[in-house]
Amino acid sequence: MLLEPNYQQPFSHLINMVMFFVVNLIHCMSKIDSFFVSDFWGVLMVVRFNPSCLTLYQHPHHSACFSKQVAVKSSYGRHMKRGGILRPQIDFPSSPLGNGDGLRVFVVSDLHTDYAENLNWVKCLNNVKHSLNDVLLVAGDVAETYDLFVVTMSLLKERFEHVFYVPGNHDLWCRREGQKYVDSIEKLDKLLEACKALGVETQPMVIGELGIIPLFSWYHESFDREKDITGFHIPPLEMACKDFHACKWPQGLSNGDMSLAMYFDAMNDKQLEMTNEVQMKCDQIITFSHFVPRQELCPEKRMLFYPKLPKIIGSDSLEDRIRSIHGAEGRKDSSSACHVFGHTHFCWDAVLDGIRYVQAPLAYPRERKRRMNGGENWLPFCIYADNKFSERLNPCFWSDYYSANPRTPQNTELAPWVARFYRQTQKQSLDV
Ligand SMILES: [Fe+2]
């Protein structure tokens, strides 16, 4: 859902938007240590991050190290010291991946294997199954085309005993599929059929003592309840979000209202019986979705290059589903209730109201090279081993930021790096 000019807009508008994007990208790259451009014009943050953990899957010696300190350089926030802060020591257990005999659950989202680098990353995953109990949860956005989706999921199925999947928005794009599908719903059906043929799970299941529940979802604009940023020219959703043009929906379904969120949520009703069975049998449950269940799992608008981002990321009914499964207060505690999500490409690991929320995105190559999560080597992230969830939260820039700083969405003063971005944009517009 990369924010690109709307190719259906008038040509002059296109030129304007291309200039807007290029000028600001160059500006950003020249001014900061590291930048992040998400599916959207995401967050830009002055940050340096020490590489963290190499997983069993990609480290030649199976080392499970974690950097002892995470140094973050930031000029923002009164709780962050100028020139860098040393946050609490992050010290994973010596063997976070378990002994390899028991059930292990790895998570990843936003594979985007349309990018050759990303497909190569999948190919480079260790192709020896470490045990018959390794599980991979793929939280959507695998590939834009059906063929690449099948290639990617086949590769993953060769490497993991169990692979689970929920669809993301990119998976349902039709723009490169010619006339193969009437609409995105037909493509969704084909993807689910392909999963069945490959042995990829899309329904709730108990493995060992752990319950795994995929949740279908789509976003709706009213998910965003925080105060809007005003006074700047922020492109409308239709222009900023490719879904509005790359997906095709049958009559009655539309990106501009609640219909898609309701449609996808209703798909979960079809697997209610299996969900109830998992709830009865299991004390520990992982649910997972592509979209975001709570707005607190996304940075505040003033931090975002595209402040309207929260309008195209999440679903209230998704959080209702999660609560109905894990309980209003979570399960016994966050060590038994976990929800994995994707879509925004912001790494996340935090506990909210008794549920642990995790995002472990592969994201786009350009994001990965400069991002603040230590690159790609920590992925897929092992969330569960030795009959328990990993005990320490994974270091992730934004969830760590919000564990130390209160959320103040009533403050609509743009963060310095965003303000600079928009000032430059408006100056460029005037110059033109
Ligand atoms: Fe997505």
Image: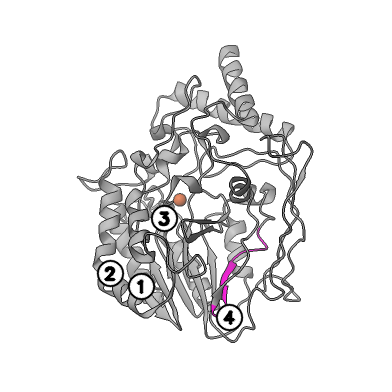
Residue type of the residue flagged with mark 3:
Gly
- SS for dot 2: helix
Spatial CA distance of label 2 from label 1 is: 7 Å
Foreground of the two, 114 or 371:
371
How many numbered marks appear? 4
The residue pinned by badge 3 equals 168
Q: Residue at x 37, y 69 (%)?
A: 202
Q: Quadrant of residue 76?
A: top right
Tell me which label, 3 or 1, sits earlier in the chain: 3
**Magenta extent:** 376-387
Query: Mark 2 to mark 4: distance in Å?
Result: 28 Å
Assess whether mark 1 and mark 2 are in contact (beta carbons under 8 angstroms).
Answer: yes
Q: Going from the N terminus, do you reach mark 2 or mark 3 first?
A: 3
Mark-to-mark CA distance, 3 and 4? 30 Å
Q: Mark 4 points at which residue?
A: 386
323 vs 303: above or below: below
Secondary structure category for the residue under label 4: loop
Q: What colour scheme governs how the chains and residues are painted in the rendered image of this protein? A: one colour
Image quadrant in which the C terminus is located:
top right
Mark 2 vs 4, N-terminal side: 2
Check the image and name the residue furthest to the right.
83
Residue 41 lies, in percent from the top left, at: 54, 37
Marks 3 and 4, the one that precedes in the sequence: 3
Q: Name which residue type carries label 2.
A: Gln
Q: What element carries label 3?
A: loop
Circle 1 sits in a helix, a strand or a loop, which is it? Answer: loop
The residue indicated by pointer 1 is: 204
**Left or right for 232, reference 319:** right
Residue 27 x/y as whole percent: 68, 29
Judge: label 3 CB < 8 Å from ligand 1.
Answer: yes
Using residue 261 as the reference point, say whether residue 111 is left or right of it. Answer: right
